[in-house]
Amino acid sequence: MTHLAIPAALFPILDPVSIIQGAGPWALLVVCLIVFAETGLLLGFILPGDTLLIITGLLTFTGTMTDSRAGILIPIWLVCLAIAFAAWLGGEGGYLIGDKIGPRVFERKESGFFSRANVDRTNAFFDRFGGFAVILARFVPIVRTFAPLAAGVGHMNYKRYALYNAVGAILWGGGLTFGGFLLGFVKPVADFVTKYIDLILLGAVLIAVVPTAIHAIQGTVKTRRLRAQERSAPAEVEPSA
């Protein structure tokens, strides 16, 4: 299986084909650990979530549905179930981190991505769309890392969160993996994804990272501007008795 090597050389840890093939018989376990870390350990900034799941499904097809038996040699239903469970567990871990230590961290930091303003905006999104927002967050890079933490910081009802977290984990973790598996039945599409996975990966990284970096910079600039205005504003003179 060959694919372009330039982006993989730049981001070797983000190349899903190399990750899966390098793990050998432990491929499914490694994929599950990455999926868990993306939300449970707040490492979504550097991990190839969506692309990894699609390639996992595609390599499961290669391993179980072709004569070469090259790929992941585990039934697709078990692969989907394991990944969905890892995604759910990661969401639970992210919520607990936000609930237990999040407020202290975010109240001290007033700028950048990890700021109280971002928590408030995320919670406003939760208030507007309800539990459905937890499900939607799964399909948005970076947001799926931040959403469980924000839900914990905002003390969203745990039972309600756990339910929607489970639904999102199944639809995202199991759904994207199974979608990758189905690609195997359409050989031209499967060949295209395999051949150009590095370019697809690079595009996904840029789409995810660039807007986030711009957002963090804008948040920092805005906060500094407000602080400068507060310092330059004349102090109110109390009326004399």
Image (cartoon, rainbow, N blue to C red):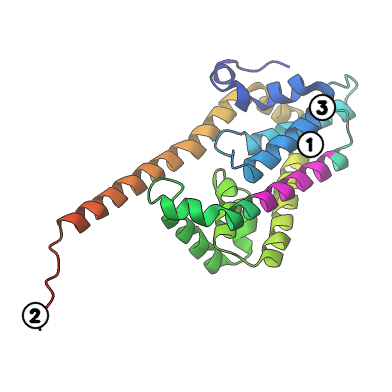
> Badge 2 is on which residue?
240
> Badge 1 is on which residue?
181
Q: Secondary structure at mark 1?
A: helix
* First along the sequence among labels 3 and 2: 3
Mark 3: few, some, or many residues within 10 Å (few <14, many ≥20)?
Answer: few
Q: Position of residue 110 (x, y in %)?
A: 38, 51
Q: Position of residue 63 (x, y in %)?
A: 85, 26
Q: Is residue 236 left or right of residue 123?
A: left
Q: Nearer the viewer, mark 3 or mark 2?
A: 2
- Three-letter amino acid code of the residue under disc 1: Phe
* First along the sequence among labels 1 and 3: 3
Query: Can residue 44 be seen from the camera position used here?
Result: yes
**Name of the residue lying farthest toward the front:** 241
Q: Pick whichever, 236 or 84, lies toward us.
A: 236
Q: Secondary structure at mark 2?
A: loop
Q: Nearer the viewer, mark 1 or mark 3?
A: 3
Q: Position of residue 18 (x, y in %)?
A: 69, 21
User: Against 130, is 232 above or below?
Assistant: above
Highlighted magenta segment, given as a residue range: 79-93
Q: Nearer the viewer, mark 2 or mark 1?
A: 2
**Name of the residue lying farthest toward the bottom:** 241
Q: Is residue 134 left or right of residue 214?
A: right
> Badge 3 is on which residue?
26
- Three-letter amino acid code of the residue under disc 2: Ser
Image point (73%, 62%), residue name = 163
Q: Is residue 203 left or right of residue 108?
A: right
Image point (59%, 20%), residue name = 8
Mark 2: few, some, or many residues within 10 Å (few <14, many ≥20)?
Answer: few
Q: What separation in Å lies between label 2 and label 1 (alpha carbons)?
A: 77 Å
Q: Secondary structure at mark 3?
A: helix
